[in-house]
């Protein structure tokens, strides 16, 4: 099995974690996401939510890095990040959201985050040599 750069994987996971903080903030999509999802705003997220979310981002970044292989060309890494985010993750959300009767706006926000997340993974891993 090919090895991956663990520091690059950590940076990719951290960058997507930061992206999520911005994406779901009041500055971007928090209010429309709350309306579309029907979620109840919390006074603050418990450490468990952040901890589990980071571990899951780390798993996703590591699996993506393994799939890309060591030192992928930037264009390939970006292309694959876009494909994984849009065609695997967001499309899968779309299937679930369709059956659950979720709104297209919610799919655009949640799916868009994952397109940006995996494209960001591609950027970090493609730039890291």
Image (tube, helix red, strand yellow):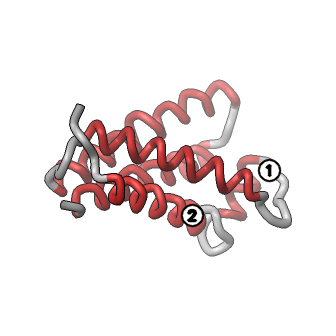
Q: Position of residue 50 (x, y in %)?
A: 66, 56
Could you tell me which residue is drawn at 56 percent across and 60 percent down?
A: 20
Q: Position of residue 81 (x, y in %)?
A: 32, 47
| Quarter of the rendering occupied by the C terminus | bottom left
Front-most of residues 112 and 122: 122
Front-most of residues 46 and 117: 46
Q: Residue furthest top?
A: 99
State left or right for residue 25 relative to residue 47. left
Q: Name the element at disc 2.
A: helix
Could you tell me which residue is drawn at 56 percent across and 47 percent down?
A: 55
| Occupied quadrant, residue 22 | bottom right
Could you tell me which residue is drawn at 60 percent across and 69 percent down?
A: 28
Q: Position of residue 10 (x, y in %)?
A: 42, 57
Give above or below for 69 relative to 53. above
Which residue is under mark 1? 39
Front-most of residues 129 and 28: 129
| Occupied quadrant, residue 124 | bottom left
Q: CA distance from mark 2 to mark 1?
A: 16 Å
Q: Position of residue 75 (x, y in %)?
A: 17, 54
């Amino acid at each position: 099995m090919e090895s991956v750069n663990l520091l690059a994987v950590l940076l990719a996971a951290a960058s997507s974690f930061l992206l999520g903080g911005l994406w779901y903030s009041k500055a971007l999509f928090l209010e429309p996401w709350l309306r579309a999802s029907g979620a109840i705003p919390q006074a603050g997220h418990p450490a468990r939510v952040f901890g589990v979310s980071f571990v899951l981002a780390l798993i996703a970044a590591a699996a993506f890095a393994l799939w890309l292989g060591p030192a992928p060309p930037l264009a390939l890494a970006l292309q694959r990040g876009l494909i994984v985010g849009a065609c695997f993750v967001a499309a899968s959300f779309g299937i679930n959201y369709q059956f659950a009767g979720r709104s297209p706006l919610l799919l655009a926000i949640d799916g868009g985050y994952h397109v940006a997340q995996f494209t960001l993974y591609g950027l970090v891993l493609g730039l890291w040599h």
